Image (cartoon, helix red, strand yellow):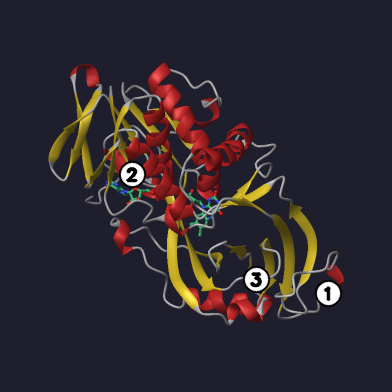
Amino acid sequence: MRVLICGGGVIGTSIAYFLSQRGIEAVVIERTGIANAASGKSGGFLALDWCDGSPVEPLARRSFALHAELAEKIDDEWGYRRLDTLGVVSSARRDVRSFRRLDGPGWLAQDAAVHGQLGSSETTAQIDPAAFTGAMMHAALRAGTRLLMGTVNGLMFGEGGAVRGAVVDGQEVAGDAVVIAMGPWSVLASRWLPLPAVYGLKGHSLVFRYTPEPVPHALFVELETEKGTLASPEVFPRPDGTTYVCGLSSEAPLPVDPAAVAPDEGGTARLRAMTTQFSPALGGAEVLTEQACYRPVVEDGLPLIGAVPGIDGAYAATAHSVWGMLNAPATGEAVAELIADGASSTVDLAPFSPARLTPLAAGAVRTEV
Ligand SMILES: Cc1cc2nc3c(=O)[nH]c(=O)nc-3n(C[C@H](O)[C@H](O)[C@H](O)COP(=O)(O)OP(=O)(O)OC[C@H]3O[C@@H](n4cnc5c(N)ncnc54)[C@H](O)[C@@H]3O)c2cc1C
């Protein structure tokens, strides 16, 4: 059996890894570069129990455990570590020091208040997202997966409407199964398959050359700016001497070409100004990277994982929204089980079935791939 995986983000590479561990031939087809999109530009924050109480709980809990296992098992490095996570409040308009419940790290502004501990080293962790995605791809390549650089611009169908391959840059590539894992660009597959609309929600981020001492904490900040707007920047110090900050969302439309994704005018400057408000030391540090990316979502906010209804051999794995880095390993494992065994055994994929949502009308997506 040969599986074509469309998209080389964290979801596509994780599926490839778990297929490769079962000896199943897979080809990852990637248009721009492994981890070029959200999977290389996200926070890489992981939490055991922040999806509890939602249908995503079993997926997230399984995935949190798999992240620890993979860090032990695969001979590669992606900055996996456990860390404490704090909630911080900061305002440019009022004194919020009365919210202080815990002493804050010394690199925060004096008037920023730590209002609580949101996670401990038992429940929260982090990875470098680009390094993790690359490591999953490399481990899959070592186990026989192929990487094909090219743009998927159609699918091929055989008798009875079953999938029999993909069209990549106009060339036919044969396959017995096809997985759509193109993140927000999975919307393009609605022209080929009965899939619901997938939207891209844009976020900005900065990578500073900055190592907070002595102990790293992940921070979730609630911030009121001088203009009275509210924002929720997230801060993740990394073991490589950098600190990542994200948090400014925007309504900007998704460009069809992933290489064309760029920050909105003034977006990263605003994010830097916010950072300076809650941590002058961090906000004043050298900026190494200014970037933007889109997280994939569908209408009900849950992931889209499973067989495409009515089309043999077609699968979707996308719409992981803010938890794609966390939930990639369990998604990869479950999709590999679904393809190889006909059903997933580690996580029940029923809540994520593409069949639960109305497909986008064929022809509604007109953009050229
Ligand atoms: C600012 C920000 C911060 C985030 N922080 C976190 C976090 O801390 N923790 C967490 O768990 N999640 C986080 N997320 C969410 C996470 O990054 C995403 O859910 C995840 O990266 C989605 O992965 P993906 O593989 O589905 O999509 P993507 O990473 O978007 O990958 C899709 C791939 O498909 C390729 N592609 C597109 N069109 C085609 C085509 N026609 N042919 C071939 N290939 C194609 C693209 O080039 C791309 O490589 C964050 C997201 C954002 C935006």
Look at mark 1 in the image and give the residue it sits on: 97
Residue kind at label 2, given as amino acid type: Gly
Task: Identify the mark nearer the N-term, 3 or 1.
Answer: 1
Q: Is mark 2 within 8 Å of ligand 1?
A: yes
- In the image, residue 94 sits, relative to residue 198, either above or below, namely below
Residue count near mark 2 (Cα–Cα under 10 Å), binned few <14, some 14–19, many ≥20: many
Look at mark 3 in the image and give the residue it sits on: 212
Residue kind at label 3, given as amino acid type: Pro
Residue 155 in the image: state x and y as whole percent. 22, 34
Look at mark 2 in the image and give the residue it sits on: 7
Q: Report whether 88 appears left or right of 255.
A: right
> Mark 3 to mark 1: distance in Å?
22 Å
Q: Nearer the viewer, residue 45 or 151?
A: 45
Residue count near mark 3 (Cα–Cα under 10 Å), binned few <14, some 14–19, many ≥20: some
Residue at x 16% of width, y 46% of height:
169
Task: Identify the mark nearer the N-term, 3 or 2.
Answer: 2
Residue at x 47% of width, y 40% of height:
74
- In the image, residue 70 sits, relative to residue 77, either above or below, namely above
Q: Is mark 3 within 8 Å of ligand 1?
A: no
Residue 253 in the image: state x and y as whole percent. 38, 60
